[in-house]
Image (cartoon, rainbow, N blue to C red):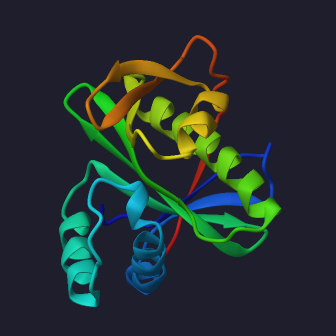
Amino acid sequence: MNNNFLVKNKRYPLLGLRTISESDQENLRTWKNANRNRFFFQGIISNEDQQKWFRSYLGDANDYMFIVISQGTDTGCMGLHHREDRWEIWNVIRGRHEQSCKDAMWKALHLMCSFALQKDNSGIHAKILLDNPAIDWYYRNGFKLFATHSDCLEITLDKEKFSKIAVDIEQLA
């Protein structure tokens, strides 16, 4: 995804989702490596691996990787891609562990899901490893069980209960 923009909403004036840039790569790599036991790929990501992934990401118009910005600080990240007939959430990582950052992450998820539904009203899914403590967080934030697999749960956003908000897109240089 080679289009830089910021996703915002008046409800959360101190929060935004900024598409990633080259300068975010070290934070993304550090956050992913620190939390690797919560994801399907659990190996250490090298700087070279990160750069290879980033080049691939830039070439896919259906991928969005966001830096969560809360009160002017890079707080975490979350990704979204559209495949076939639905959105898939990936790499939701809280990079900072203060309570205010925890609060920012659920608002960011709300903002990102609203962004996705505004673009295409298809379903929103995520796959979560069975031992990931974030499963309850997703349930508290509007997701429900879709399927159970041997190593993970597949969850889907309950659009009947989800309160979508209008999002504003600000183009960045």
Above or below 141: residue 168:
below
State the image quarter where residue 56 is shown: bottom left
Q: Position of residue 126 (x, y in %)?
A: 39, 36
State the image quarter where residue 49 is shown: bottom left
In percent of the image, x 81 and y 61: which residue is there? Answer: 100
Q: Position of residue 132 (x, y in %)?
A: 48, 47
Determine the residue located farthest toward the top in the rendered image: 160
Q: Nearer the viewer, residue 158 or 60?
A: 158
**In this picture, residue 136 sits left or right of residue 172:** right
**In this picture, residue 133 sits left or right of residue 15:** left
Q: Quadrant of the N terminus?
A: bottom left
**In this picture, residue 89 sits left or right of residue 149:** right
Q: Position of residue 30 (x, y in %)?
A: 45, 80
In percent of the image, x 29 and y 53: which residue is there? Answer: 40
State the image quarter where residue 83 is shown: top left
Above or below 57: residue 61:
above
Q: How many marks?
A: 0
Q: Position of residue 159 (x, y in %)?
A: 54, 17
Q: Nearer the viewer, residue 136 or 59?
A: 136
Q: Nearer the viewer, residue 112 or 96?
A: 96
Above or below 107: residue 126:
above
* Residue 163 shows in the view: yes
In percent of the image, x 65 and y 34: which residue is there? Answer: 166
* Residue 120 shows in the view: no
